[in-house]
Image: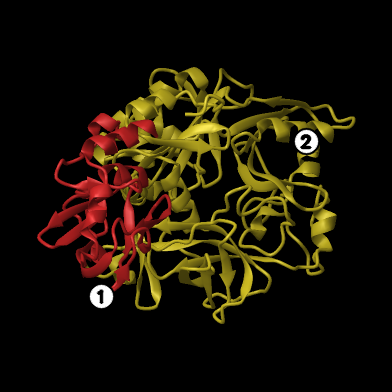
Amino acid sequence: MKEISELNLPEDVRYTKDHEWAKVSGDTVKIGISDYAQDQLGDIVFVELPAVGDSFEEGDEFGTLESVKAVSELYAPISGEVVAVNEDLEDAPELLNQDPYKGWIVEIKPSDSSQLEALYDRETYLGVLKGE
Amino acid sequence: MNKEMKTTLLHEWHVENGANMAAFGDYDMPLWYPLGVKGEHLAVINSAGLFDTSHMAVVTVEGEGARALLQHCFSKDLERCLGLKKTGLAAGRSVYGLFLTPEGHVLDDSIVSQVTDSLYMVVVNAGMGGGIAAHLAEHIGELPVEITDLTDRVGKIDIQGPASAQILSKLLKDPSAVFESFPYFSFKGWFAEGVSGQEMVELTDGTPILLSRTGYTGEFGFEIFVAAEKVVSLWESLLEAGKEKSIQPCGLAARDSLRAGSVLPLSHQDVGAWPFGENPWPFALADRDENGKFSKDFIGAESLSSLSLKEYTLAFAGYDPRKMAVSDKSYVADVGGDRIGIILTCATDMAIDRVDDSIVSIATPIEDGKPEGFTPRGLSCGFIKVDRQLKPGEIVLLTDGKRKIKVEVRRDIRPNRTARRPMKEML
């Protein structure tokens, strides 16, 4: 298990209390799981993805991750419509372990961009991790 | 870590080497190391893995009445349990069975090993040493027997996988003598200075060990018992000796996925406080005649003989790696969606996948149907307890009310396991 100081937590993404990340590019937002999440889950063996076109409200479950340890729900950090899913994960779910920031899960077109501001920056997320 | 947790002597090693730790029974144990559980699981199938199993408990039963006491308390008939001819348990041989309540519920499962005519070693699960020792003591009556609970006083390491004997050879004083005539479920040596009548097995530095050809992975390998103070150095020596075979330290997650794929039960989860009825493990009991009468009397036998079956425990395998978490919300449904039972174990065997209609393992030979370039995604597998008898091939659903996973009732799960392979093929 990684020490908190060993975690890879880039500055250019926002984080959630559910250990996901969100990264804005243009008018869409890519979503994935943090290094802390992948380290805690262990080997991810299956990713259940939503369909392109599905819409979610902030906090909705949009998919599941199967690790050897558990089945974990993925929660939408912001409301919006799925415009793309990372199909590479269907054959290679381990991409989420290998590089959780390159291994995005879904791309969402937000319905309310202001929700992004409520997500944690790196420092706040680090504080959450240290508090746990 | 919870301050109340117990630890094994390898705990510091696990933490220093980056293990993801979690509670198992009373013990803080490694779930996996940095390589990850998939790599650990595959290492045991392909080469070798090392497991700290010092949390398991050793109880010795010693004295002229030892065999009679075990005949009364243990589910297996020690006079009829070895080989096709069903001969009696003898020195150097081990047998798997259960300690039951009078109602036929499982107190714990165990491997009983006969060391000498009057000394037996009973190995039970973590935290069960005291309970089983007390259970045995309760039934001593007038028998001349002494029972000793050696919980936390004996170190235990399992080396599992096809390269296990080759790796061990480097550490044994006389490997060719040790490995000559060493069938499945036999053992040699003792974990302390000599017991009269028992041949010693020694490491090159003179440390005595008890080497047992048993395990909990379905694969070829050994359980090694050693004095507690020697367990860390033995662990490190085994990792060093196995380096060129890419031996891996393995945590409890890989142990669970390997045993589930091998159709082995976890005590208190797959067998436990309910009658030991119809399930994949009838071999844990004494043989029965055509009328269902056991070949001996033992605690629980009467209840099991007159059991009217209401529940059936069955093995299953899914069609992809997806699992259903075992919780209060999860249950087993028939294909129509009606609830028929509960999930006992659900794990992912990462060495297998479905090819056409069969399950194929990375250990399956090409000529037996393994495709070129086979890279399995893994299959969910485990055990369910349902209210009706289902045949192999029948389909049921595992669900938590939201997600549904289709699985198939199976007689067996991971093919081409190596546990019973002849010793001479493994050197």
Task: Identify the residue at the far left of this view.
Answer: A26
Q: Residue at x 52, y 64 (%)?
A: B400
Q: Quadrant of residue B63?
A: top right
Decide if residue B283 is on the left or right side of residue B54.
Answer: right
Q: Position of residue B49 (x, y in %)?
A: 37, 41
- In this figure, what is the number of numbered marks? 2
Q: Secondary structure at mark 1?
A: loop
Parent chain of label 1:
A
Decide if residue A18 is on the left or right side of residue B260.
Answer: left
Q: Residue at x 49, y 55 (%)?
A: B260
Tag in front: 2 or 1: 1
> How packed is label 1: few (under 14 Cα within 10 Å), some, or many (20 or more)?
few
Residue type beneath disc 1: Gly
Residue occupied by mark 1: A53
Q: Which mark is residue B127?
A: none
Residue type beneath disc 2: His
Residue B222's place in the image compared with A24, above or below, is: above
Residue occupied by mark 2: B135
Q: Position of residue B184 (x, y in %)?
A: 52, 47
Residue situated in front as seen by the camera: A44 or B182: A44
| Distance in Å between CA atoms under marks 2 and 1 | 62 Å
Q: Residue at x 52, y 77 (%)?
A: B393
Observer able to see residue B173: no
Q: Position of residue A90 (x, y in %)?
A: 26, 66
Task: Identify the residue at the far bottom of this view.
Answer: B336
Give the chain ID for the red colour: A
Observer able to see residue B324: yes
Task: Identify the residue at the far right of this view.
Answer: B142
Give the chain ID for the yellow colour: B
Parent chain of label 2:
B
> How packed is label 2: few (under 14 Cα within 10 Å), some, or many (20 or more)?
some
